[in-house]
Image: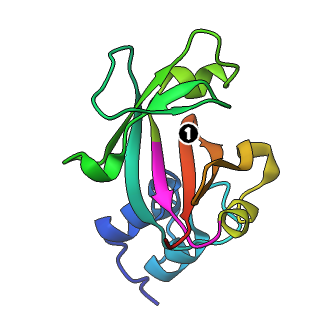
Amino acid sequence: MKKETVSRRDVLKTGSAGLGLALAGMTAGELQAAGPRGAKKPQKIAFHHAGIPTTKKQEDETYLEESKVYITDPEKHPFGIEWCRWMPDSEAPELLRTTTHLAFKVDDVEAKMAEFDKEIWFIEPFVPFEGAKVGFINFEGTLIEFLQKSEK
């Protein structure tokens, strides 16, 4: 019996592990069910912003005292960028202070984090400011933020 063809879209949906699975001869259905490496099960999420470290003061920054970082509102940026200006005495992990992270809006941070092996958790869920809860994973060397916003 001939296997169905795996499309480029199917490979892209599963992340970087998808190409290897496709090359291993998996069907599109098997490929989609496999999901990204490190995930216990695939689930749709919505892109929210890219957090980019900077040393340049930005207009309309908000200071988060606990983390010792100034951030901008990505919802006000045309490309969804959150500029992050870390203070030298911040105790945030160096990887967070020095690399770009990608943030995805989720309904429940704890539930989303629970889909991934604890070994890739980078920062456990916390409340950086009123109305938001975030958690971070280190997914194959890329920091991913899960953002839960409460309705105002």
Q: Nearer the viewer, residue 90 or 97?
A: 90
Residue at 71% over, 65% down: 115
Residue 84 rendering spot, x and y as whole percentages: 44, 29
Residue at 58% over, 71% down: 42
Residue with the mark numbered 1: 143
The residue sitting at the right extreme is 118
Q: Nearer the viewer, residue 152 or 109?
A: 152
Which residues fall within the magenta stretch? Answer: 102-108
Q: Is residue 86 magenta?
A: no
* Image height of 45 relative to 63, above or below: below
Q: Is residue 142 visible?
A: yes
| Scheme of colours in the image | rainbow
79 sits to left or right of 1: left
Residue at 57% over, 60% down: 131
38 sits to left or right of 32: right
134 sits to left or right of 46: right
The residue carrying pointer 1 sits among few (fewer than 14), some (14 to 19) or many (20 or more) residues within 10 Å by Cα, namely many
